[in-house]
């Protein structure tokens, strides 16, 4: 482990956190002395007897009796019939058949082996060591990015196999899923290997296992001996989650996921000896963390849209589970979920797209489908079914995730809601720190999301990006100014630093330095502060003004964003004040598929949108476009975790002494867009 990083990390811990981590390190050493004993095969038989059963078969019967009434209390035959009426069964079966023959795909990387090596990084092909879990460094870049291996071990493909088996009645899919469970247990004895290291991964994997068991039981019940082994592993993992759960400066979305796993297992597996404790602990943590990690206006304090959607699924499914089992988590949880959906609704353009603000590892709680960009419309559909509020209705049909969470009648319930007549309007989210300026007129639409919030959550701000005062813009349902995304976490090196740097966002950098100072892949040392100055909205236009104090040498950046609703024009006024000479750079990131056509030295037509758009830069700036530069990185876009592509970034620079004021205007023009064969200018991948 890097000693410099360790010192930096310690500097952001409280004395209480340091004491807790020292105690946990000692507990792990004690566990290491006995973990081989925990792995002994006869322990499973002893476990069954300690639960009060004379055989795994007796345990299996009682377990499934509990699971069928506590997790998803719906009729399987009705669900199978209704699924066939509403969804593409052939596509589902084809996907399941591919998993049977080749294994799952992880972030676009196919495993291509039905005999899965659960310790292998699907991207690099290298293997994590099989030794005591707490002696493995998950940041070891020589193996690869740990997220790829952990994603494989979440086993989300088991959802596909389970649904395919239930809908078609074909035992083959369920049996292959059971084989994957057995091979996982064979390769991952208690506390051996990387898959026993993360409490969050153990919690999410337990959820996958329980859903698989629930949906496949009527088709082909799992062998009692295998079920006993699974329950033994779940019991050990939940005990580990309870004691090693995220705390102090690490208590972010990981803690929510861990609480979800504890609550889920506690409710669904009352036979396990720790179930009552896990249920109570998970419920209490969910009740507290839901309101600690998500602001009253529905904004996630980690400052990332994708993690907020992940948190929403955790809280929604816990809420539904609690409701079905007559358990109260918190009286205000359903309303809090609606606030999250409302935040997404206001950012969403007419094609259901939101800016990719902050970190995004494409994390999912459930594997019913891979939603991609539809993840936010899924959230709105969930909110519509939960609240019966028509403004959340994102479409006439439920997605697969909501079909299974809410049950086979979800489609009818959604259809009963009238079409929404409530268009989202401009809105300030003062607690979380965002201003949304938007206007609709016929098929014309402009949506601008302005970041006026903090860097991130807790002392390390693990998933925040240096994007203060950044503007993300959509025109007529097509992103125009974008957040370039995340690309990689562990092992990302310079790429990890770039995608969360100031230069990778639609904001300003002064003297070549970021707004805040990085200390590691999930660590920020110095955090700039953003302050809202004013927000105004009217029928004629909107205006938000805020300033940021994180820039070097005492420079203050104030940005005013104004939306002229009649002319569909967005104007950015950037004022920089600070003693002495400085150089400022304004960055504007365009997604792949859009191209810039120079119409003079400071005016660009943006080609590739449904309508014409124009960018007018301040006449005093130097202008350059950058596409796919490697060192230092600039001109890149990552639409999914682990994938990047070249795109175009526009950079406007100027030197100033003491003060500078720069004006940029972005207009949606009423004349039609140029046809593709008339588009000129640099294309992604061209030299610039």
Image (cartoon, helix red, strand yellow):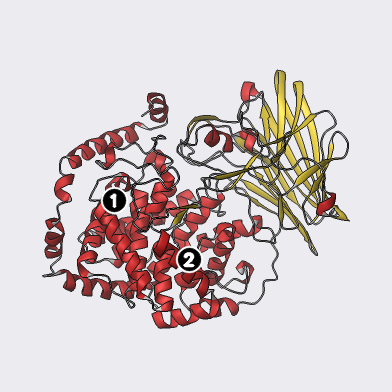
Q: Is residue 676 left or right of residue 213?
A: right
- Crowding around mark 1 (Cα neighbors within 10 Å: few <14, some 14 to 19, many 20+) is many
State which quadrant residue 581 falls in.
top right
In this view of the protein, can residue 130 be seen by the observer? Answer: yes
Front position in the image: 585 or 95: 95
Numbered mark located on residue 242 in the image: 1
In this view of the protein, can residue 285 be seen by the observer? Answer: no
Callout 1 secondary element: helix
Q: Residue at left 36%, top 61%?
A: 207
Relative image position of residue 57 (x, y in whole percent):
18, 72
Q: Residue at left 54%, top 43%?
A: 487
Q: Residue furthest top?
A: 580
Circle nearer the N terminus (2, 1): 2
Instruction: State how many labels appear.
Output: 2
**Residue tagged 2:** 95
Say which quadrant the C terminus sits in.
top right
Q: Residue at left 27%, top 49%?
A: 240
Q: Residue at left 48%, top 66%?
A: 95
Relative image position of residue 94 (x, y in whole percent):
48, 68
Q: In the rendered view, would you say 83 is above or below 559?
A: below
State which quadrant residue 499 falls in.
top right
Callout 2 secondary element: helix
Task: Give the foreground label among 2 and 1.
Answer: 2
Q: In the rendered view, would you say 165 is above or below 539?
A: below
């Amino acid at each position: 482990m890097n000693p410099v990083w360790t010192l930096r990390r310690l500097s952001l811990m409280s004395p209480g956190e340091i004491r807790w981590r020292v105690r946990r390190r000692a507990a792990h050493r004690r566990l290491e002395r006995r973990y081989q004993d925990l792995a002994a095969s006869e322990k499973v038989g002893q476990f069954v007897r300690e639960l009060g059963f004379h055989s795994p078969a007796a345990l299996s019967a009682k377990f499934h009796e509990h699971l069928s009434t506590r997790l998803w209390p719906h009729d399987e035959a009705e669900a199978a019939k209704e699924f066939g009426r509403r969804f593409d069964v052939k596509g589902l079966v084809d996907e399941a058949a591919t998993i049977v023959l080749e294994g799952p795909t992880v972030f676009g990387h196919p495993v291509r082996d039905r005999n899965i090596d659960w310790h292998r990084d699907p991207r690099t092909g290298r293997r994590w060591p099989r030794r005591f879990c707490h002696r493995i460094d998950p940041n070891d870049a020589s193996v690869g990015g740990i997220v790829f291996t952990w994603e494989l071990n979440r086993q989300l493909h088991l959802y596909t196999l389970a649904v395919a088996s239930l809908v078609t009645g074909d035992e083959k899919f369920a049996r292959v899923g059971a084989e994957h469970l057995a091979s996982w247990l064979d390769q991952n004895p208690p506390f051996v290997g990387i898959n026993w290291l993360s409490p969050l991964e153990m919690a999410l994997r337990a959820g996958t296992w329980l859903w698989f068991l629930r949906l496949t039981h009527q088709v082909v019940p799992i062998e009692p001996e295998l079920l006993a082994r699974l329950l033994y592993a779940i019991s050990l993992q939940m005990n580990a989650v309870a004691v090693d759960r995220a705390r102090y400066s690490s208590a972010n979305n990981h803690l929510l996921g861990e609480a979800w796993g504890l609550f889920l297992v506690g409710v669904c597996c009352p036979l396990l000896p720790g179930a009552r404790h896990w249920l109570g602990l998970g419920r209490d943590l969910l009740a507290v963390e839901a309101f600690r990690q998500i602001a009253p206006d529905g904004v996630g304090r980690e400052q990332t849209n994708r993690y907020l959607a992940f948190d929403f699924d955790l809280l929604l499914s816990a809420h539904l589970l609690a409701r079905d089992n007559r358990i109260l988590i918190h009286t205000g949880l359903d309303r809090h979920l609606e606030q999250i959906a409302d935040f997404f609704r206001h950012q969403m353009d007419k094609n259901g797209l939101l800016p990719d603000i902050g970190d995004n590892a494409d994390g999912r709680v459930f594997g019913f489908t891979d939603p991609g960009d539809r993840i936010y419309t899924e959230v709105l559909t969930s909110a519509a079914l939960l609240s019966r509020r028509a403004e959340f209705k994102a479409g006439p049909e439920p997605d697969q995730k909501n079909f299974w969470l809410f049950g086979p009648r979800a489609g009818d319930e959604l259809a009963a809601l009238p079409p929404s007549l409530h268009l989202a309007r401009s809105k300030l989210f003062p607690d979380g720190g965002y201003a949304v300026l938007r206007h609709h007129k016929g098929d014309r639409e402009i949506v601008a999301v302005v970041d006026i919030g903090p860097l991130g959550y807790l002392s390390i701000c693990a998933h925040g990006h240096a994007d203060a005062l950044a503007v993300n813009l959509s025109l007529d349902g097509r992103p125009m100014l974008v957040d370039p995304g995340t690309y990689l976490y562990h092992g990302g090196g310079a790429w990890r630093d770039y995608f969360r740097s100031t230069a990778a966002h639609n904001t300003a950098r002064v003297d070549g330095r970021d707004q805040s100072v990085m200390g590691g892949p999930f660590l920020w040392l110095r955090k700039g502060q953003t302050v809202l100055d004013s927000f105004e909205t009217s029928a004629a236009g909107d205006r938000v003004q805020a300033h940021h104090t994180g820039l070097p040498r005492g420079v203050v950046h104030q940005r005013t964003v104004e939306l002229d609703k009649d002319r569909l024009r967005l104007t950015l006024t950037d004022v920089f004040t600070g003693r002495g000479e400085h150089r400022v750079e304004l960055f504007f990131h365009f997604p792949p598929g859009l191209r810039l056509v120079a119409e003079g030295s400071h005016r660009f037509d943006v080609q590739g949108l449904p309508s014409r758009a124009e960018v007018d830069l301040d006449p005093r700036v130097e202008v350059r476009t950058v596409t796919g530069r490697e060192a230092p990185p600039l001109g890149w876009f990552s639409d999914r975790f682990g994938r990047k592509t070249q795109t175009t970034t526009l950079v406007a620079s100027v030197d100033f002494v003491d003060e500078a004021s720069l004006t940029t205007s972005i207009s949606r023009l009423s004349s039609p867009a140029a046809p593709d064969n008339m588009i000129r200018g640099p294309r992604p991948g061209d030299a610039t």
